Image (spheres, grey):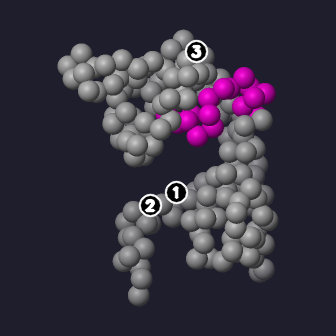
Amino acid sequence: MERPKAMPASTDLPARELDDISFLGRLSEALSTRIEEQTRPLFDDAGITVPVRSCSLLTALGSAGEASAAELARALGQSHQLVIQKCPALLRLGLITQHPDSADARRKIFRLTEAGHDQLRRIEAYSVRISGVYRSLFAEVGDVHGAILRALNALEMRPLRERVG
């Protein structure tokens, strides 16, 4: 069976490099970028102003009620630095507030605003609709979600370093 050729997306690598199996990480980034690009207009239609890559942060904060950047990073499995980088945009949009912790002034506590709760409700409604779209896509190309999860779990159990022969 012939492998499908990669179509150049909004990427700086030519398609032939995306076809090279050794560029698996870059190919995954290209998929993420393509999804982000195609999600933004759908978000606009749904009245979602949250940056696409910040939805999980807003969702985690909604679940927690309030949390520090370190707590959010742990909940999301992301770096503290990445969470901190996403917060200024959410603050500017009026979706979250930041307050010093009464027990430790160096520690900042984040909470959703009413606008943040509204955006979270919109994201939840959007998620129901987009799940069906992804299921349709997976019927066409195979279970990408499951494949990514299996690959992440396999690499967690046995990193690339251990796989090099």
Q: Secondary structure at mark 2?
A: helix
Return the residue nearer the eye: 133 or 82.
82
Q: Residue 65 occupies which quadrant of the picture? A: top left
Q: Label 1 to label 3, Cα distance in Å?
A: 32 Å
**Amino acid identity at mark 2:** Asn
Q: Nearer the viewer, mark 3 or mark 2?
A: 3
* 11 is higher (above) or lower (below) than 19: above
Q: Residue at x 40, y 43 (%)?
A: 81
Q: If you read the primary sequence from the N terminus, does the residue marked by circle 1 or circle 3 appear first?
A: 3
Q: Residue at x 72, y 37 (%)?
A: 40
Near mark 3 (Cα within 10 A), the count class, few <14, some 14-19 or many ≥20, is few
What range of the chain is rendered magenta?
Answer: 42-57
Confirm whether the magenta stretch covers residue 51.
yes
**Amino acid identity at mark 3:** Ala
The label shown at residue 153 is: 2
Q: Secondary structure at mark 1?
A: helix
**Predominant SS of the magenta segment:** helix
Q: Label 3 to label 2, Cα distance in Å?
A: 36 Å
Which image quarter holds the C terminus? bottom left
Q: Residue 66 occupies which quadrant of the picture? A: top left
Q: Residue at x 43, y 66 (%)?
A: 155
Q: Label 2 to label 1, Cα distance in Å?
A: 6 Å
Residue 4 in view (yes/no): no
* 73 is higher (above) or lower (below) than 32: above
